[in-house]
Structures are given as C-alpha cells and as structure tokens.
Amino acid sequence: MTEADPQHVQAVFDSQLETALRWRESTAAERITRIRRLRDALLARREAFYDAFMADYRKSPSEVEGSELLPVMDEMRHAIGRLRRWMRPRSVWPTSTTLGTVSAIQYQPRGRVLIIAPWNYPLSLCFGPLVSALAAGNTVIIKPSEMTPAVSSLMGRVIADVFPESEVALFEGGLATSQMLLDLPFDHIFFTGSPTVGKIVMVAAARHLTSITLELGGKSPAIVGETADIKRAAETLMWGKFLNSGQTCIAPDYVHVHESVKDAFIAECRKVLRSRYGETDAKQKLSADLTRIVNERHAQRIAALLDDATSRGAVVRSGGEVDLAQRFIAPTLLDQVPQDARILEEEIFGPLLPILGFSQLDTVIAYINARPKPLALYIWSRTPEEIDRVLKRTSSGGACVNHCVIQFAHGGLPFGGVNNSGIGSAHGHFGFKAFSHERAVLRSSPLMLVKLFFPPFTESRRRMIRRVVDMLRLPML
C-alpha cells in the first residue's frame, strides 16, 4: 500500500488556507455551482462505479444505485434547493437586558475541513459529507478507506476532475496517511467509523481544539412486539439487516421478539430470505444480490462470532454457511443465543442476526439501557402505548417505528449518534450546520439598557439594577 507523501499533504493543506479565507465570502450561487459540477462528474462515471464496487466486494449495480448514489444525489438536490435559505442570517429578538439592540446568527464556513470516510459505504459516506462541507463554504481534504481501493481510486479521479487541490483533495493510503492528516490543525474533522477509532480521532482533534463530528456505530437493537405485523416486520428487518451483507452501521444488530410470536416471526423471516436470495444455501451463495464481506480478515472475524455462539448453544434457524475464500457468509438467523456469547457484546457488522425471546417489555428496555447508547433503535408494534413507552424510556441516535434503516435517507432529519454512537449530526440542514460556525452578531444602539450597568454605581443606580434583576422573575411573554 502506498502512503501519501508528507510534503505533498502539507503543501495541499497550506494551499487551502488562502482558498478558505476567500471562500468565507462565497455566495450561494458559487457553492451551488461546485455541487453541480461534482454531481455531473459523479454521474459521468456511473458505470465505472458499478465496476469498482464489483471489484472491491461484489456489490450489485442495483445496490450501488440504491445505497450509494441515491443518498448522495438526494443530499445534492437538498442542498441545491435550500442553500440560499440556510445561508440567510437568522434574526433573533432582543432579551430583556439587551433591549435596543439588533441581533442575528450568521453562518460562516469553518475553514479547512477533513473528512475520514469508512469502507462499508465508501461513496455515500464520503461524498455525502463532502456536499455538506461545500454547501457551507469549506475547503476539504478527504481520506477514504484503503479497504475499498477500486472505489477510493475512482473517487479520487472524480475529485481531481472537478477541483484543484487547493479547494478539494483526496489522499489514499492507510494508517500512516490517516495519522499524518490528524496531526494537521484542521478547523473541523468529520469522521465516520467505529467508536474505538472515533476515540483516537477525538484525542487528535483535542490537540488543536478542532471541532468534530463523529458518526460511529454500536449495537442497534430491534424489538418485535406481540401486536406487530409479523409479515411487515420480517420484510423490512430482513432488508435492513442484510443490505450490504450486514455491513451497515445502523443495521439491526439483534432483535427482541415477543415469545408469543417468535416462531411465526422466524418462519416468516426464513420465507423472505428464500424468496430473495434462493431456496437453498447453494443458491444463496450464487445470488448476485448478496454483497461479499469486504475482506478475508473481516470474514474470519464474523465467522468466529458465529462459531462462538453455536459452540455455546445457539441454534441456526437459517443460513450458517461460511466460505472464507469467497468472503461469503450466508444470511444467518440465530435462536437461543446465550448471554455470554461474544455476538451479544461485539458489534457484528455482518450477516448474522441473534433473535432473543421476551415476555415483558420492561425487561427489554432494561437490557437496552444497560448497554452503550446505540446509533439506532427499531420497534415493530401496532400498540401506540408500547411504542411510546420504548421511545421515552430508551436513548439512541435515531429511531424507526415499523421500519428500519430508512431514517438515513430522510434529508430533513438529523442523522447522528449519542455518546458512544456519535457526536453531532449530519444530512441536509444539519450537515450544513455541522460544517458551519454559528456566529452571534449584535448591533448596538444609543438606547441600550446596558448603560445602566456602567460605573459609578450610585445608590439610585443600584436600586434600578435591583429592580431589573427582580423583573426577570416574571414569566416571558
């Protein structure tokens, strides 16, 4: 693996300073033009991306369209259509103590930003934040994953077609390149990856007091209640879990199913898997719609989780086949998983789904709350009180009711984690704000009440100040 040249990286970083200062005054029209040029260059290489994803981990063109291109195109459309509104200063009414002033919040570019993207959705999770950074008026350096070399190389060519390196640059490489970039005093870092690496990024950012957005992961729980539409739950869960072969940060990591419907749910899931990927293990292995695991090391890790679970008594209800040479692991449903199995402690990030029976919802809520806050939470139920109970008593980055994963595609919602699953939000207006500094601007007038607080403090002035303080006990109008 070839690492980026340190002198070249430093030269590009230095060259982006002048651009970043100039782009503070960039107009909405100029920023929209950059996004449109990026969009056109991306679509011009559409077929090439099909080939690159097939080379890296046999991802089908349909899945490339739906899970990689579609989110980026929607992000672009959203930004182009709303950017002028987002950039407009927002007026703020004066408070009781600032009467006579005029205030507003202005949105400034943060400056030079770094985007570190992961391998599981290398295009979507690289170009999505890039659109937000450009909309906010920033220069950008991108570090894609070395685990998807074909896609990363192609993204680099797209970037080079559209931007000079003094505006946007992409550096391939591995750990050394990442460390090199993290040593630079960026104005903002946007990282998508695991909580473990997120902590490393946070430490690096702290050295320069750089602001950060961390899109992490964790074990996202799913709940199928007693009143759930079992067919709908199976159809949506089997899609959200096995999309990209389970290599999705918001994929359901395990599912609690009410004991009264568990057998029916498993039967429906088996039916869905057979209809989508093939009636037998052999046919599923030949399915063009099952993405492969990104590399053999990750396949071995997932296979080890499966072996550990079954050795401790877990029962395979569907799937279970492993072919490390082909990086293939069948969509697998696991029942009767013991609590000491590693699969219930580690993030799976693969096509294995533990199914846990329950009889009392409070037990499930306690189970979820005893673990780090997840990036997503899913519940299938037709009982509003049950849904409300779960949403109020748990915490997660986002949540879906009677569906899963689809919340990522809603550009009007903030996408992000909480604590262990992330810091900050992305997408749409929230992505624009992540890459912007919200600057408070107050304009004074001769009638400012604050003059009351200027010395010298006579007795009469002291009484007036006291009256003002006492007035603050009154409710706001």
Image (spheres, rainbow, N blue to C red):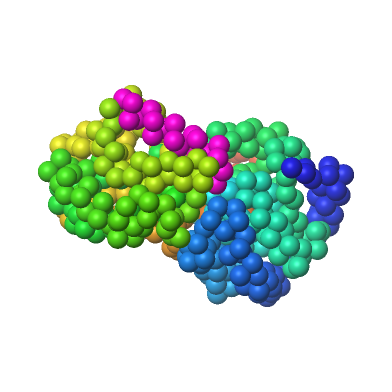
* Left or right of residue 118: residue 337: left
Where residue 353 appears, as percent x and y from the top left, is 34, 42
Up/down of 55 relative to 390, above or below: below
Q: Is residue 329 above or below residue 20?
A: above
Q: Is residue 296 magenta?
A: yes
Q: Position of residue 87 (x, y in %)?
A: 61, 67
Between 148 and 156, which is closer to the camera in this rendering? 148
Q: Position of residue 55 (x, y in %)?
A: 60, 56
Q: Residue at x 83, y 42 (%)?
A: 6
Quarter location, residue 476: bottom left
Image location (x, y in percent) of residue 69: 54, 66
Q: Residue at x 32, y 34 (%)?
A: 369
Visible residue check, residue 149: yes
Please tell me which residue lies in front, 60 or 377: 60
Residue 461 in the image: above or below residue 407: above
Query: On the rendered structure, is 296 left or right of 18?
Result: left
Let me know if residue 450 is in the magenta part. Answer: no
